[in-house]
Amino acid sequence: MSQRHSILRPSALSQWLIHIAVYAIALTMLVPFAWMITTSLKTRGEAISTTPTLLPPGWPWEWQWGNYSQAWATANLGRYYINSTVVAVVVTLLAGIHNALAGFALAKMRFAGRQPAFTMLLLVMMLPVQVSFIFAYVICGWLGYVDNYQALIVPFLASAFGIFYMRQAITSVPDDLLDAGRIDGFSDFEIFAYIIVPSIKPALAALAIFTFIASWNSFFWPLIVIDSNDLATLPLAVASLSNQYYTDSWPVQMAAATIITLPLIVIFLLFQRAFVEGITLTGIKG
């Protein structure tokens, strides 16, 4: 047995090569972010120079930090920040509850139509989300959910991916724990609150990150349902900047893009451990 394991175990050289390849791929993914940040610190002439440089000259005393204040003031990013934050936080909280409840029902409850409902869920996941936007817009129009916060929040209070993700996580919770709760007189909602939720906290954290990022970066749906400038979100503001609606300065546009991206990076760094644990948890049992 030990000889077999020694054969299957990769050599030290192979491990080093794998690590080098992984780090090289990671660095290539970081290059666009580094280029965005450094461009935001250049002058307009340096940004459009025919001989571009990664770092702006005069490091770091001559960097154009004023591009950030100009982007914030020119595009009124403060108002857009409030809109995006309100929408992303509300959607993340409510969608987490709804998806977890639906996942609990599909994973642990026995009811008529349970398997067809799960099959339909898988079929919905195969369709691009843009396919549903026409029907969602018509329904929002009937409900009066156009050009208001409801239009940005209500359609995303549950998702096929979120329900499936929660279902996979809750399936890994032993049935014996639920039976013990029922013996103690717990209702289904109490079992969900006191047994299921504590057991899947990492998966909930991972889903919260997915949901927050998707809501924060959402562009196509707000572009459809929002008409007034006061309710626009940050991606719409960056689109206006890139279309030279406010300014034709590339450094200012990159400064605005950096301002929008930083919260996502901070959130992921704060919750990356829970994110990794959540991904691992959902793969324990299919």
Image (tube, helix red, strand yellow):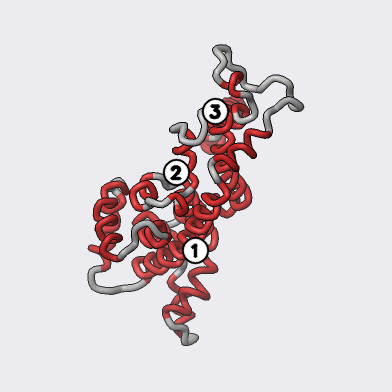
- Residue type at mark 3: give it: Ser
Q: Residue at x 49, y 39 (%)?
A: 238
- The kind of secondary structure element at disc 3 is loop
Mark 1 vs 2, N-terminal side: 1
Report which quarter residue 274 is drawn in: bottom right
Q: Position of residue 105 (x, y in %)?
A: 36, 70
275, 285: nearer the viewer: 275
Q: Which residue is mark 1?
A: 93
Q: Position of residue 34 (x, y in %)?
A: 60, 30
Please name which of the two marks, 1 or 2, marks the residue nearer to the observer: 2
Q: CA distance from mark 1 to mark 2?
A: 23 Å
Q: Which residue is mark 2?
A: 236
Q: Residue at x 44, y 78 (%)?
A: 189
Q: Which residue is mark 3?
A: 249
Q: Residue at x 47, y 32 (%)?
A: 244
Does 152 sit above or below residue 263?
below
Please indicate, yes or no, whether residue 58 appears anywhere in the rendered image.
yes
Disc 3 + disc 1, Cβ < 8 Å = no
Instruction: Looking at this view, name the residue that lies furthest to the right.
Output: 61
User: Which quadrant would the C terminus be assigned to in this image?
Assistant: bottom left
209 relative to 221 in the view: left or right: right
- Circle number at residue 24: none
Mark 3 vs 1, N-terminal side: 1
